[in-house]
Image (cartoon, helix red, strand yellow):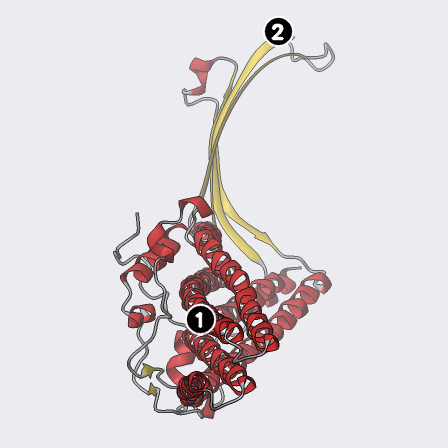
Amino acid sequence: MKTLLLTGLSALALSACAAGPTYVAPLPPPKAAAPFATTSAATVTAAPDDDWWRMYRDPVLDGLVADALAANTDLRVAVARLDSAGASLRGAKTDREPQINAGASGNYARTSQLQNLPGLDRERATYDVGLNVSYEVDLAGRVRRGVEAARGDVGAAQADADAVRVSIVAATTRAYVDAASSAERLGVARRIVDLLDKSTTLTGKRVEAGRAARLDEVRIAALRSQRAALIPQIEAERQAALFRLATLTGRTPQDLPATAGARTTTPRIDQPIPVGDGAALLARRPDVRAAERRLAAATARIGVQTSQLYPQISLGGSIGSTALTVGDIFTGGPVRWLVGPLLNWTLNQSAARARIAGAQADTRGALASFDGSVLVALEETETALSNYARELDRRTQLQAARDSAATAARITRARQREGTIDFLEVLDAERTFADSDADLASADARIADAQVDLFRALGGGWQQPDRARPTLG
């Protein structure tokens, strides 16, 4: 047994730094740090702004984002989880400190006559007080690896909270943009209906004067009804966006201030958007940071389990006193004390090795998750960049089409008044103009959505959540 003990202590000395692998942060693929593959005149490679929503230059939006960061319920959940992880870390750190326990007891008992010592009453009180101190000599690094794992959990929880902030800022901005763009589309739809009302009135007069057929009046009225039917749908979309905005900012729908829905034009950014490069993206994305911290925690837990293969040594002592009266406890006679080391070593190590294998498998899974998060971050950003550039190109073409349709509609209306063209040509021109005007308004909304998608993919909006910002009433 002595030889076995010496062998174990020798092995422990050789591994005295800390059991298990030392964590080294993984490196993403070399090309992941390069500039993005998608480029356009609408973006620049400068570092992205933390408060990216301020690029819209809208104080109401600034206030809504501040309110969301202060009151959103999902964010409160994430912060609570971060606090829980911090408490676990503090608990893990206490394992590095001496453990001190104090106890006291008093009882009154009757002993069996056969067990009672001569000269003592069979019924008597007994009092006991004691103080125990122990300290684990962390030679195998169990405590150190446990603290490392807890730190990794805190880092992951912090990154998760940051990811929630990114989502909340993006969702708040999107809801505000959707409400504003719906208001703009609503205005376009109403203008088209007003225009078709005028055409209906004019056509009715021409029918009365015998210069147009009744069928012409019916057709223009049908087109007018079709366009009017879109108005309730757009109004519902706008209300849904405002209700969503209320929830995101921690309000009931009735409590959302009127200023939140006052804007009637789609917010626009009048400058190129800074996007940085791949290296900055991976350092900024909360999901990538969370995956890296979970990998660090999983690696440390291999060490925690590996330490179970070695003896655990604790140094400790105790002092106490047992007496028949309270006054006798504090005299020197009944005082007891004990000092010495305690060695605990599980020789059947099959269970420990199974737990090590499980921790190693968890670490391989965490590494795969990290690699996947890197690829997803790059995919989402490249996709958002491409979609934004294509939406801008699409709007340019739609603007040209709308301008041409407006010109054609004016010409056909003038020629109709002169009686030089058939009514079907007027109807077709009106329908084309209505479609192009609505398409342009929808394109502005799609561009705003693409911008929010891009900002969310870039992962900004969490770095300074506590900075003072204006809030709405």
User: What is the C-alpha distance between the residues marked 1 and 2?
Assistant: 115 Å
Q: Amino acid at mark 1?
A: Lys
| Of labels 1 and 2, the one closer to you | 1
Left or right of residue 8: residue 269: left
Between 464 and 176, the residue placed more toward the observer is 176
Q: Amino acid at mark 2?
A: Asp
Residue 308 x %, y %: 61, 61
Image marks 1 and 2: residues in contact by CB distance under 8 Å: no
Residue 214 x %, y %: 60, 74
Q: Which mark is residue 120?
A: none
Q: At 59% across and 9% down in the image, what residue appears?
A: 124
Q: Which mark is residue 121?
A: 2
Between 278 and 244, the residue placed more toward the observer is 244
Residue 331 x %, y %: 41, 20
Please determine whether, in this image, residue 392 is positioned above or below residue 292. below
Between 111 and 419, the residue placed more toward the observer is 419
Q: Helix, strand or loop at disc 1?
A: helix
Q: Helix, strand or loop at disc 2?
A: loop
Mark 1 lies on residue: 198
